[in-house]
C-alpha cells in the first residue's frame, strides 16, 4: 500500500517544474508525503512483526533479549517514580519473574515504533532493541537524515530548504529503497522465528 502511495506521489508531483510552482508547494508536499509513507510503512512493519510473533506464541525474551525493554516499561516507570528505593528495586526484581516469560500481548510496541522523526538515530535505537542488522542502511544514512527527515522537518515547520532543484524521482526512489530495506529486515526476522 505504501509503495503504491509513493508511486502516486511521483505521478502527482514528479513532473512539476519550479517555474510552474514558484512557492515550492509541490516539492514540499512531495517531501512531507514521502516521509509520511516512510514512517507509516516502518510502523506497519513493526505491527506486522509483533502480530506474527504473537501468533507464533513467542515469548518476548525468545524473540530477542533486548526486546524485554518493551515488556518492562511499567516496571521501569515504577522504579523511577519510587526513586529507585530499596523497596522499588526489590519489587522490580520480583516482577522480572513474570516478565521474562511474557508473550507479545504484554509488549509495548511504541518501544520500537517511530514516534516522530524516524531518523538514523531512532532507527538505530529501534534496530538495537529488535536485534536487527543496520549495516544495509549505512549507504543511505546521510540522505535519510538530511533529505528524508531533515527536508520533511523543514517543510513541516516552516524552515524548508531550497527544494527548487528537487529531483522527485530520485527522492521517491531513495524513500522506496529505504522502505525495501526495512521490509527485508522484518521479513528476515520473521523467517528466523518460524
Image: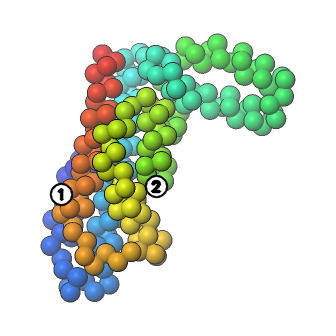
Residue 95 lies, in percent from the top left, at 68, 18
Question: First in sequence: mark 2 or mark 1?
Answer: 1
Crowd class of label 1 (few under 14; some 14 to 19; many from 20; radius 10 Å) = some
Q: Is residue 86 above or below residue 123?
A: above
Q: Residue at x 31, y 75 (%)?
A: 163
Q: Position of residue 104 (x, y in %)?
A: 48, 24
Q: Which residue is mark 2?
A: 117
Residue 174 relative to residue 130: left or right: left
Answer few, some or many: residues within 10 Å of disc 2's Cα (few below 14, many 20 plus, some between 14 and 19). Answer: some
Give left or right: position of 25 versus 154: left
Q: How many marks?
A: 2
Find residue 146 and report its horizontal and vertical position in percent: 39, 61
Q: Considering the numbered disc 1 on the image, is that residue within a helix, a strand or a loop?
A: helix
Q: Which mark is residue 7?
A: 1
- CA gap, disc 2 and disc 1: 22 Å
Dividing the image into 4 quarters, which one contains the C terminus? top left
Question: What residue lies at 31% left-to-right and 19% top-to-bottom?
Answer: 192
Nearest the eye: 142 or 40: 142
- Between 176 and 136, the one lying in front of the other is 136
Q: How is the image coloured?
A: rainbow
Amino acid at each position: 500500500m505504501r509503495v503504491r502511495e509513493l508511486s502516486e506521489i511521483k505521478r502527482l508531483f514528479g513532473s512539476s517544474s519550479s517555474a510552474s510552482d514558484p512557492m515550492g508547494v509541490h516539492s514540499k508536499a512531495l517531501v512531507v508525503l514521502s516521509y509520511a509513507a516512510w514512517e507509516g510503512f516502518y510502523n506497519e512493519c513493526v505491527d506486522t512483526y509483533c502480530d506474527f510473533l504473537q501468533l507464533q506464541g513467542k515469548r518476548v525474551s525468545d524473540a530477542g533479549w533486548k526486546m524485554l525493554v518493551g515488556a518492562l516499561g511499567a516496571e521501569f516507570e515504577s522504579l523511577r517514580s519510587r526513586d529507585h528505593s530499596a523497596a522499588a528495586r526489590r519489587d522490580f526484581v520480583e516482577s522480572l519473574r513474570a516478565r521474562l516469560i511474557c508473550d507479545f500481548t504484554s509488549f509495548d510496541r511504541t518501544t520500537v515504533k517511530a514516534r516522530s522523526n524516524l531518523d538514523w538515530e531512532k532507527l538505530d535505537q529501534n534496530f538495537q532493541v529488535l536485534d536487527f542488522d543496520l549495516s544495509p542502511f549505512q549507504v543511505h544514512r546521510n540522505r535519510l537524515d538530511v533529505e528524508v527527515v531533515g527536508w520533511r522537518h523543514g517543510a513541516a515547520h516552516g524552515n524548508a530548504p531550497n527544494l527548487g532543484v528537487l529531483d522527485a524521482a530520485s527522492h521517491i526512489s531513495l524513500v522506496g529503497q529505504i522502505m525495501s530495506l526495512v521490509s527485508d529486515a522484518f521479513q528476515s526476522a520473521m523467517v528466523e522465528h518460524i
